[in-house]
Amino acid sequence: MKRRALAICASLLLVALVPGSTLAITSTSNLDQSAATGSTSTGGHFLAQTFTAGRGGLLTGFDLSLAVNGMTSVTVALQGVHNIGGNMVPDGIVKATWSEFVTGGSSSTPSWVHFSVPSEPVVAPGTMYSIVFDSGAAAAFGPPGDLYAGGAAWSNPQGVGWIGIANLSDFGFRTYVDDVGTVLQWDKPQITAGTSTSLTLTATMTYANGVEANHYGALLGLVPTWFTPTGITCSDTASKIVPADCTLLNFGNGFGSLIPASATGDIMTFTVTGTAGPAPSAAGTSGLAGADACIDYPDESMLCGDGTASVDVIAAAATPAPTAPPTDAPRTAAPPTAAPPTVAPTVAPTVAPTPTPSPTKAATPPPTSTGVGSSSDESGSTIWFLPVVLIALFGLLILDIRRRRLAS
């Protein structure tokens, strides 16, 4: 645990020295700069190839195109550069030095010779460095043309100053810079305070390294106190993780020697599932998670890259006050409909029927006497007839008066 804590601190230092080292790495290859070999060669005790680092990290190795008939010792040093007369040449400040034995069967047939750099010096992207070597009995080869723009081949045969090589612009070389990065991500951008929510944290760790790496480290160094991990799954492209070792305990304490390094790098993915239960008071804060990926080397040096991820904790939505049921507006009574006026039925005037007058008996005219009759009989008949006529006329008059009154 102490060493892992130191690894985190060391990684922070390397982040400062190597900008962008914790960004996502697109490839596990640690090959950085290179120039092709060729048929042109030169030899000598003081040769140099300058180069401009393209990535930041640890310079763990480089290759030179050499040819030797037999075996010879080649001494190498990594130096910086300075400007002499407009030329960027080795500055004599040694960052690392070592020797390698080189063997071969021909001094005219070059091959790539790999040099592992001890103590893995840090290089910064965009900065020029120099590989200074004494080739001994070996010849160094390169292309006839100037194919590499980030540096040049130099010679210092007398040890008094660096000069260009007339027929050789660059030596054939390759540099290897180890790098490691961690990318963390929550599966939700925000969670609600005072509630229990399922939450997943994914850590992707990319290791770009060569044969010098020893073991990989993987550590979940920080999770919010309200996050409870419940499960984990592990996978990697180089199949270096043993399934039985994929436990929350190992990830929390840090995988160390459990994961051997691959000579071609590796990409590891850890998916941690769990439950988030922030208190209501956590609203307005962020839940921070941190993880750390490291490459361990046999000489106990280490290269690490950190990553962080945050999830926002938001307040629960306010519960709206109960809404009173809507009150129906009082109904407006329709104005009473006036009943149509009662019209008294028109009573037709009763007209008394006009009595039918009794037929008037016509007076019997007195017979015309054609002879002599009794005078007493004729007088009696006339007296009887007159009252009857008078009564009839009087009745007619009464009826006519009544009719007129009723008509008026």
Image: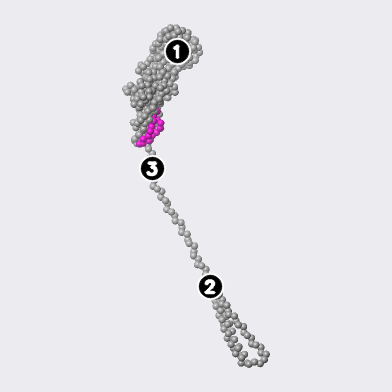
- Above or below, comparing residue 322 to residue 118 in the picture: below
Residue 39 at x, y percent in the picture:
49, 10
Q: Is 373 placed left or right of 271 in the picture? A: right
| Magenta stretch bounds | 186-202
| Secondary structure category for the residue under label 1 | strand
| Secondary structure category for the residue under label 2 | loop
Judging depth in this view, the residue of 351 and 137 nearest the camera is 351
| Secondary structure category for the residue under label 3 | loop
Q: Residues within 10 Å of mark 3 (few under 14, many from 20)?
A: few
Question: Which image quarter is the N terminus in?
Answer: top left
Residue 184 at x, y percent in the picture:
40, 27
Q: Nearer the viewer, mark 3 or mark 2?
A: 2
Identify the residue under disc 3. Answer: 320
Residue 289 at x, y percent in the picture:
37, 28
Distance from Cα at disc 1 to Cα at disc 2: 149 Å
Distance from Cα at disc 3 to Cα at disc 1: 75 Å
Judging depth in this view, the residue of 121 and 126 nearest the camera is 121
Identify the residue under disc 2. Answer: 350
Q: Please name the amino acid that badge 2 sits on.
A: Thr
Residue 77 at x, y percent in the picture:
40, 12
Distance from Cα at disc 3 to Cα at disc 2: 83 Å
The residue sitting at 46% across, 11% down in the picture is 111
Q: Is 81 placed left or right of 396 in the picture? A: left
Q: Residue furthest right?
A: 370
